[in-house]
Image: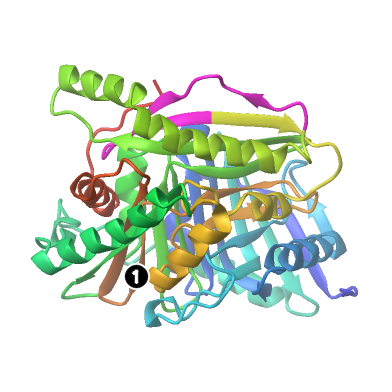
Amino acid sequence: MNYPDSIFSETVPVDEPVDLLRAIRGCGAAPLFYWERPDHGLTIAAAGAVAEFRASGVGRFRDVSERSRELLRSLNPGRSGNPGGGPLMVGGFGFSDRACQAHEWREFPPAWIFLPRLLWVRRGALCTLTMTWAKDDRDSVDRLLARALQPPRSCHRSEDPSPLLELRPSATTPLERIDWRERVERVRSQILAGALKKVVLSRRLAIETASPIDPARFIDSARAARPSCVNFFVSPGITSFVGSTPERLVELDGETVTSSALAGSVPRGDNPEEDRALGDSLLGSAKNLEEHQYVVNALASALEPVASPLNVAAQPRLMLLPEAQHLFTRIEGRLREPRSVIELAGLLHPTPAVCGVPREAARAIIEREEPERGWYTGAVGWIDAKGQGEFAVALRAGVIDGSRMYLFGGAGIVAGSDSEAEFAETENKLTALIGSTPLGTIA
């Protein structure tokens, strides 16, 4: 596909401090994209689309990768006030390569990425703004920018000091517990029969409030409580997908590719002594170590043909989040030949941390049992003209549709799983996004 001299971009430094979340919320243009990693000092905020690509089927990663890189390379750059700035494409993809039929996911295709009209990138103290427009349409970008930067009539933050309390989920019904137990036992019976080793099952919780739900409130809460996570929201128009995920699927920086295994968990303790004891029990748990090793092995196997040497930690560490402690292993290597971050995401997705082992058998069970997953356990991220970028697994997440929100939480089922313990794990994860408790770090 050719892109003639019809799309232009200009990147300039931003000297004055800008509330990027408020700016994109205030410009009134869809789609919107927001991504931040507070402990890395990285924020990406985007509004409006000059071009967008949608794809489905087994070739969705290849299609989106090729088309996005071709478009980015075809842009006609204007002056650039910052050598490190420039256009990006942003978006994500769902768990399945088939469209989700649930109404709340109607705006989210299996893969979707767009070139923003306005793109802010803040790295530490440096911030750039990239404006992109179609030929003879520069004025519309200037008007959009003026709207984004105008003083707000009111801040998006609620005057209620506890604005998220109204979203506390109601008590679980006995029917939900029975359904979960039956699903777990169906999977365990197949695992015990030797058909599979692991399947990640999830639950979906619907919440309704008296007024429309603002995704920006979740970002505000997560920024303080979950600085080591990727806090994001994506809104194609009417609905929004929002989350605070601890799991990186893949990052490509130059020739260095990085992924992380995050699987196996226990709750947080009520005091430091109990917390340490729970962490020690996790590090010594045969069931959780087995589940974690499935993920490490799968990530390494997927990356070994394209990156070497691989550096894989010999033992997992603990990642401490407000709702849980997880086993964590970092995997890093150097690419043997050029690949885009989206191509790498396609090699890795879905990992055993969100799907199971073997992958195709587990995926078939999930798509049959959970037709409403949508972008939950998919990924959200960005790519530049060189193919570099990052995608994070969409966990601790929910989709917002007006005054309704659908939260998701999952657990890995293996031979030694107990349905009640796994149910408790999903409860912790379902409330993670709407809670705000002190955050730990990787220990």
In the image: residue 384, left or right of residue 350: right
- Is disc 1 placed on a helix, strand or loop? strand
Q: Residue at x 34, y 21 (%)?
A: 284
**Residue 110 image-quadrant placement:** bottom right
Task: Tell me: residue 287, above or below residue 391.
Answer: above
Q: Around disc 1, counting alpha carbons within 10 Å, would you say few (fewer than 14), some (14 to 19), or many (20 or more)?
A: many
Task: Tell me: residue 397, above or below residue 287.
Answer: below
- What stretch of residues is rendered in magenta? 308-329
Q: Which residue is mark 1?
A: 400
Looking at the image, the residue that sits furthest to the front is: 193
Image location (x, y in percent) of residue 155: 31, 60
Image location (x, y in percent) of residue 163: 18, 57
Image location (x, y in percent) of residue 192: 38, 49
Question: Is there any visible trace of residue 106 in the rendered image?
Answer: yes
Q: Residue at x 25, y 46 (%)?
A: 425
> What's under tag 1, amino acid-wise?
Ile
Closer to the camera in the image, 324 or 29: 324
Image label count? 1
Check the image and tell me how it is coloured: rainbow
Magenta run includes residue 225: no
